[in-house]
Image: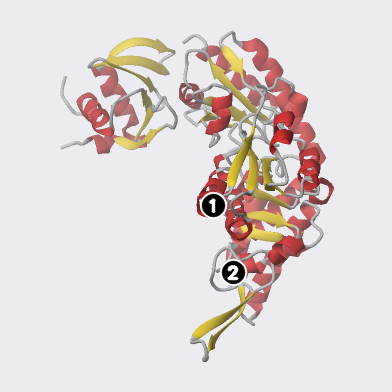
């Protein structure tokens, strides 16, 4: 059974008040992760198929075709993990 | 990178390495690898000669009077910590002050704050103007006979502003204090003459000047290094460790500087590779390096000023006072958004606080994007960078 860790290489929290979480997907899984997320989340805006502004379960986030995503203001690592699990692991 | 040619504009963080440096590392491990100073065999002599030649080369590069004034460290951060612990811990007391500025990298703030918690001295902060320059009036109002050390960066790692270190040092000395300079962003990019600047200490990192990571130097005037206590204990930093039957303790005789501050096996290969990096820079000439980077900075600033309506340049727009570093933002996007967008096009820049959160508070910024150049960057790369910035503005 797949886990979030199968897809995610790193989660980095930025300093300061913003406290963004930057998710880097594993290189060999990034296309699959991006495709899964695009299928699940609601696309709000995109530029040239490179940046995607998305919304999922009331949370807005930004994803990049290079296999990275920024979540802003997510309360905790556990909440972020649950969102990623819902995006990457659960069937539509 | 991401199906695009790589454009590397994160040189203030670390630089790429020329073939000569990579070859020097390979050559050292293939042909000269041995520990230094400790053996009588030929290979050890070879390694020692290379390591000590590197020290001399580094000393000459910044015009130190004597190679013994160059202490090998892992980088600028370790150099500040060395100074804080080996000098600060033994010379600063309650009532004394260390003066730094609000533009400092965290590595030139945190060690002083750490030591002040032990010794009870005060750390004072000189204010920064909104254009990123030092508020000299505030600096002069904060320096006094209580100040024992001033610790300033030569070039800001966020704004690229070049501080007038000679002028600052003069005021610092008039007040009877010592002057430490964080040269991490200046030594790689311009001629730096420690005797002309008359600074007491100066530190820099090898990896920001084409050399490998894990090697850097702390320059200190010889008479000051001689009076300082060691930083870490171990082999190499002692002349003698003998068991005293009377006291049933060991008597320790410190080595002379710079070895007194270099406990354990040093980064021998790192020093040799740094020497090669310096040779490479010298073959170009540091005035040429500075001139070229100023040309790139001027070109980038001018083009960026007119390229997009949402682009904001932070700090001084006077590029004659700046050195190869351009902080900026795009209205409505975080610095990380900008960096990740550029990354898609193979353009590497830095985003965040760049380890200088107090300066971002001065600029009233959550974070900033930073493009920083070096000798291998080109105007064509800047054109491509601008092209992509125009695209991001659509967002």
Q: Is residue B144 visible?
A: yes
Disc 2 element: loop
Q: Which mark is residue B115?
A: 1
Residue visible at 65% across and 68% down? B259
Q: Which residue is more in the foreground, B278 or B152?
A: B152
In the image, is residue B23 above or below residue A62?
Answer: below
Count of residue discs: 2
- Report the side of A57 relative to B72 (left or right): left
The residue carrying mark 2 is B33
In the displayed image of the protein, which residue is found farthest to the bottom?
B245
On screen, residue B232 above or below B41: above
Quadrant of residue B305 within the rendered picture: top right
Q: Relative to B213, is A27 above or below?
A: above
Going by the image, does B203 lie left or right of B232? right
Q: Who's the residue at 57% across and 68% down the image?
A: B263
If you read the primary sequence from the N terminus, does the residue marked by circle 2 or circle 1 appear first? Answer: 2
Of B260 and A23, nearer the camera is B260
């Amino acid at each position: 059974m797949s886990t979030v860790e199968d897809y995610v290489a790193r989660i980095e929290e930025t300093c300061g008040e913003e406290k963004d979480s930057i998710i880097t997907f594993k290189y060999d899984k990034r296309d699959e992760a991006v495709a899964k997320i695009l299928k699940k989340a609601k696309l709000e805006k995109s530029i040239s198929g490179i940046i995607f502004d998305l919304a999922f379960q009331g949370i807005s986030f930004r994803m990049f075709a290079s296999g990275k995503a920024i979540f802003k203001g997510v309360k905790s690592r556990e909440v972020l993990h649950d969102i990623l699990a819902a995006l990457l692991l659960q069937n539509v | 990178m991401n199906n695009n040619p790589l454009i590397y504009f994160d040189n203030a963080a670390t630089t790429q390495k020329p073939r000569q440096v990579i070859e020097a590392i390979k050559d050292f491990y293939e042909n000269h690898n041995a520990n230094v100073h400790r053996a009588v065999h030929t290979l050890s002599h070879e390694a020692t000669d290379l390591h000590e030649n590197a020290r001399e080369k580094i000393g000459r590069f910044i015009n130190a009077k004597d190679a013994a004034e160059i202490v090998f460290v892992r980088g600028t951060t370790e150099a500040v910590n060395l100074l804080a612990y080996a000098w600060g811990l033994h010379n600063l007391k309650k009532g004394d002050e260390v003066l730094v500025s609000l533009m400092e990298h965290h590595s030139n703030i945190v060690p002083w704050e750490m030591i002040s918690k032990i010794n009870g001295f005060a750390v004072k902060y000189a204010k920064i103007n909104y254009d990123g320059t030092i508020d000299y009036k505030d600096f002069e109002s904060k320096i006094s006979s209580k100040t024992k050390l001033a610790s300033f960066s030569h070039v800001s790692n966020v704004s690229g502003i070049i501080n007038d270190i000679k002028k600052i040092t003069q005021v610092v000395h008039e007040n009877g204090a010592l002057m430490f300079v964080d040269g991490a962003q200046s030594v790689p990019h311009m001629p730096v003459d420690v005797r002309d600047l008359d600074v007491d200490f100066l530190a820099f990192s090898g990896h920001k000047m084409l050399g490998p990571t894990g090697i850097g130097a702390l320059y200190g005037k010889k008479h000051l290094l001689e009076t300082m206590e060691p930083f870490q204990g171990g082999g190499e930093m002692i002349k003698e460790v003998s068991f005293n039957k009377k006291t049933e303790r060991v008597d320790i005789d410190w080595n002379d500087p710079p070895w007194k501050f270099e406990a354990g096996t040093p980064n021998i290969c790192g020093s040799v590779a740094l020497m090669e990096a310096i040779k490479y820079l010298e073959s170009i000439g540091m005035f040429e390096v500075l001139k070229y980077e100023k040309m790139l900075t001027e070109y980038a600033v001018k083009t960026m000023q007119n390229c997009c309506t949402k682009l904001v340049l932070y700090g001084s727009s006077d590029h004659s006072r700046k050195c190869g570093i351009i902080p900026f933002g795009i209205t409505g996007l975080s610095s990380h958004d900008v960096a990740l967008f550029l990354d898609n096009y193979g353009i590497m820049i830095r985003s965040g606080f760049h380890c200088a959160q107090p300066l971002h508070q001065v600029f009233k910024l959550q974070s900033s994007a930073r493009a920083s150049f070096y000798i291998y960057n080109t105007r064509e790369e800047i054109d491509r960078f601008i092209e992509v910035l125009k695209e991001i503005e659509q967002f």
